[in-house]
Image (tube, helix red, strand yellow):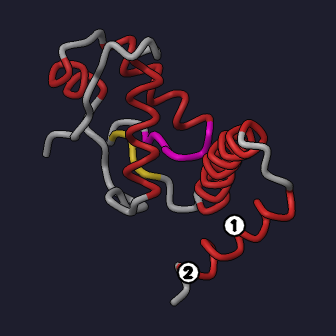
Amino acid sequence: MPMKIVITASGDPIYQQIGTQIKEMILKKELQPGDMLPSIRLLAKELRISVITTKRAYEELEREGFLETVAGKGCFIRACNEEAIQEEGRKRVETSLAAAVKKARQAGLPLEEIVAMLRVLYEEDEI
């Protein structure tokens, strides 16, 4: 099954775009622990990129704890990656909150008001 990865001219390195999209699929539970990824050569062929670029993407994901390589079998979504998934989620939330805080400061909103907004938004999702 082909991976649904899209390479763009965003300025981000291609290996990073691949890694980001695979992490996103893991976070969204589209890829489950134990799922096998396409071989490095197959993914490179599908994306029409260098094998070296695909290899680097997989190595980065393995270093971050998202993948494990089994010699002679391939690359798999790592079974014990809850900590890596949580850390990735924290980083994404922190990035979004930093952007929101910047906008709030530009709008002249006091911290108390921002906290109140966040509380309402957070509790709204629980209903």
Secondary structure of residue under mark 1: helix
**Distance between the alpha carbons at the discs numbered 2 and 1:** 10 Å
In-image side of 27 versus 30 (left or right): right
Q: Which residues are magenta?
A: 64-70
In-image side of 113 versus 41 (left or right): right
Q: Residue 120 occupies which quadrant of the picture?
A: bottom right
Circle 1: is it few (<14), some (14-19), or many (20+) Cα within 10 Å? Answer: few
| Marks 2 and 1 close (CB-CB < 8 Å) | no
Q: Earlier in the sequence, mark 2 or mark 1?
A: 1
Say which mark, if any, is on residue 118. Answer: 1
Residue 72, compared with residue 17, is above or below; it is below
Q: Which residue is mark 2?
A: 124
Check residue 67 for magenta coloring.
yes
* Three-letter code, disc 2: Glu
Q: Position of residue 39 (x, y in %)?
A: 27, 32
Q: Residue 35 occupies which quadrant of the picture?
A: bottom left
